[in-house]
Image (cartoon, helix red, strand yellow):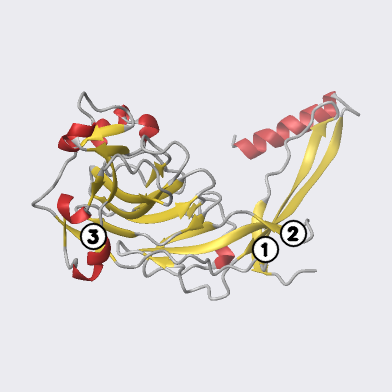
Amino acid sequence: MNSSLFKCCCMALMWILLPGCVVPHFDHASYDYYYAVPLKADKPWLSLSNGLDLHAYNKCEHSEVPPKCDPPGFWVMERPQKPDWHEIGRYRVSVWHPGKLQFQPMLSAYANTTYRAVSLVKEESRKIYLLRPGFGGDERRSLEGNDAGVVAIDLRPNALCSTDEPVPRLIVFDADNIWVFAEYESDCRKDLQADFAPLDILNFEDSDQFNAILRKPMKLFYLSSSVVGQSDFGQPRTVLRDADLPNESTRKTVRLSEVVRLQSTMFRLETTPAPPLLPVPDYPNFYCHYSDTVIGLRMIFFDGEKPYPDLKYCRPFRGK
């Protein structure tokens, strides 16, 4: 006896044995999700050299006046795929929601990894994300080699300045190490000269066009997958000269002699920084409708299971 026939027999038996206790059941659930999607849907906000395209969009609350949109999210696609916004409302679409943010231009360089860097500013920190193809949108961890889909690097105020925030100008990374060269916008602890020019630490391909920043002394932060657990909250540690840190490294600082310096590796520069503006309207122009209906029998004293609405369609939206 299959399950459907068994259920029918059980319902019929209940109807006979419990007259008046079993009643017809009808339950309908529906709702809409509203979005602000780019008007030029086939043009990504950012194209990375690892084959990833990031298409920006917002999820909005149409019930509010004016409509309130959440912080931007990104539909992450591998080229040559193009977004079909009629699919954005489906579950398991590969989207990435880094949270409230403001993107800033930043130079990056890589070697022996499929990750690429995207930099942004949050309310309390400078954040850098490394993204690779094939990631799941819910994968986000500290540096763990190439296992994590999204590597989050939180460049918060560290040993040199307790209140000022470092501004990343260049991030360099391979499968196991991250070097971040940054500046402070204020005159913070100028008495402690721990500045390093990127070209004094690492080597870069076709570096002439970026000499201005590659030869500029800056604060250096470092993180290695082998010692990520020794770092304060998994943050890159401030690099100091051995003479400035005579005893031993701490959770916030590391001696220059302990920083990996790959002189035989040539790092390739990523020449397409993230645009500061997102090509997304500030009003909803697209929506997806979800609905479902459950019809059957149930006992009076038993609350039936509510339907879980399915996506029915997504359409352009012009407002009320």
Q: Which residue is mark 2?
A: 62
Looking at marks 2 and 3 on the same chain, the residue that comes earlier in the sequence is marked by 2
| Image quarter of residue 145 | top left
Label 2: element kind = loop
Q: What's under tag 1, amino acid-wise? A: Tyr
**Labels 2, 1: front one:** 2
Numbered circle sitting on residue 234: none
Q: Earlier in the sequence, mark 3 or mark 1?
A: 3
Please tell me whether mark 1 sits on a helix, a strand or a loop. Answer: strand
Position of 69 with respect to 87 (left or right) is: right
Choose top left, top right, bottom left or bottom right for residue 283: bottom right
User: What's the amino acid at mark 3?
Assistant: Leu
Where residue 3 sits: x, y (%)? 61, 36
Going 65% across and 52% down the picture, which residue do you hit? 310
Identity of the residue drawn at 51% across and 43% down = 124
Viewer-proximal residue among 231 and 249: 249
Looking at the image, is mark 2 or mark 1 earlier in the sequence? Answer: 2
**Residue farthest to the front, as pictured:** 191
Q: Residues within 10 Å of mark 3 (few under 14, many from 20)?
A: many
Q: Residues under labels 2 and 3: Cα distance?
A: 47 Å
